[in-house]
Image (cartoon, rainbow, N blue to C red):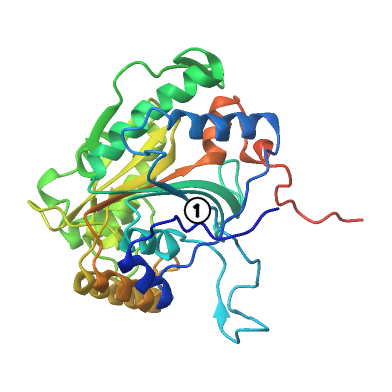
Amino acid sequence: MHRGAILPVGIKPEAKKLISLGVLRVHTQRSARLGNGVGAVVEAVEDVGEDREIDDRKDEVEDRGDVTLVPVGGLTGHLHVWLRLHDHPEARPHKRLVVGGFERVYEINRNFRNEGLSTRHNPEFTMLELYLAYGDYRDLMDWVEKALRGLADAIHGSKEIVYQGRNYDLAVPFRRLTVEQAIIANNPGIDPLSLRDVTYLRTVCEKLGLPVNQHDGPGKLQMNIFDETAEHTLIDPTFVHAYPAEVSPLSRANDADPFLTDRFEFFMSGRELANGFSELNDPEDQAARFRAQVARKDSGDKEAMFYDADYVRALEYGMPPTAGLGVGIDRLVMFFTDSPSIRDVILFPHMRPETD
C-alpha cells in the first residue's frame, strides 16, 4: 500500500497558508481491486468520469482517505487526542481542500456507522464522494443520471438492466419530485396544507405507529413519515429533493423557502443510493446549525451531528459555492451484479459470532 501526500506543483499561496494552519491535510491510499463485481463498478465509476463535465482530470484531486481504526472515542497513543471512526468524511478533509483552492475533489472511502445489519446495511461500507466548486445540486442530479447510464453501458453494454427479476430502463429520464410531493402521493387523505404543522404531523406519526421525540420539529417528523411510507415505493430511478433544513445541517437553505434546503437523494429499487446538495458555506449559519444538532443529540437523537469547530473555522477562510455528492458503492454494486444482499458484495461482511 502506498501512502503519501498529493500536493500539486504550483500550489496556490492561499492553500499553502491553510496547510500550515492544519486546515488541509491530504493522505492517500491506493484502492485494491477486491472482487470482480466491486472492481468492475469502481473502475467504471472512475472511467465514466473521463467524459467530464464535473470531474476534469487536469484539475482534480483524488483523496483516498487513510482511515485509522480506533474505538469510538479512543485516545491515540501519540497525539493524546480523542478520535472517532470515519463516519462523515466530507467535512474533513474534502471541503477543506475546496477552501484551499482545489475546485474538484473526489474520494472512494470506507465509512463506519453503527446503524445495524440488514440486507441493505453494513456497519462498514464504501462510498464515493465528490465536490464541485461553482456547481449546485442540480448539476449533481444531472451527473448522477448521466453516470448511471454510463455505468450500465460500461458494465453490461446496455441501459436496460435486470435486478432481482425486474427490468430497469436507465435510458428513460429519471423521475424528480419533492419530499412533500412523495409524502402526499403515498399517504391518501393527508392534508397537504398541514405538512409543516407539528401537532398535525405528530398525529400522523402516531397513527403510523412511529416514535416521536418531544424535540422533533416539522422537518424531522416529515422525514419519519417519508421513510415509513414513501421510500420503499421508489422503485424506478427517482430523485427526491427539497429536504427540510432541520435534517440537512450541511446543506444550503433554499432561496425561496428557507424551511427547505437545496438537497436531493437518489433512490432506486426502493433504497437510497446517493445523497447530494448545494453546500452551506456561511460559517455563522453553519455554526448555528451545528449547535442545533448538538441540542438534538443531547435530547436523544443518535443521528444528530457533533459541533465541528475546525470545519467552521475553515469556512471562515471562505468556501466558494460548492456542490457535494455521496454515492453508496456497495448498493451500486448490488444493483449492477444482481445481488440481493449487501453482504454478497462485501468480501468480509460482519457476521454473528459462531456458537458451539
Residue occupied by mark 1:
63
Q: Amino acid at mark 1?
A: Asp
User: Nearest the camera: 14 or 329?
Assistant: 14
Q: How many marks?
A: 1
Report whether residue 204 is seen.
yes
Looking at the rendered structure, the secondary structure element under dot 1 is loop
13 on left or right of 63: left
Q: Is residue 302 left or right of residue 174?
A: right
- For this orientation, the residue located farthest to the front is 10
Q: Quadrant of residue 301?
A: bottom left
Q: Position of residue 266 (x, y in %)?
A: 36, 38
Of residues 75 and 60, which is closer to you in this image? Answer: 60
Q: Categorize mark 1 by other alpha carbons within 10 Å: few (<14), some (14-19), many (20+).
A: many
Residue at x 32% of width, y 78% of height: 295
* Vertical side of 285 occupied by 188: above or below: above
Which quadrant would residue 203 be assigned to in this image? bottom left
Residue at image position (33%, 31%) is 238
Name the foreground residue: 25 vs 84. 25
| Residue found at the very far bottom of the displayed protein | 80
| Residue 227: % across, % down | 37, 46
Quadrant location of the C terminus? bottom right
Residue 27 at x, y percent in the picture:
55, 61
Residue at point 44% right, 15% down? 159
Q: Residue furthest right?
A: 356
Q: Is residue 207 visible?
A: no
Q: Tell me if residue 207 comes above or below residue 157 in the rendering.
A: below
Quadrant of residue 258 within the rendered picture: bottom left
Please tell me which residue lies in front, 32 or 88. Answer: 32
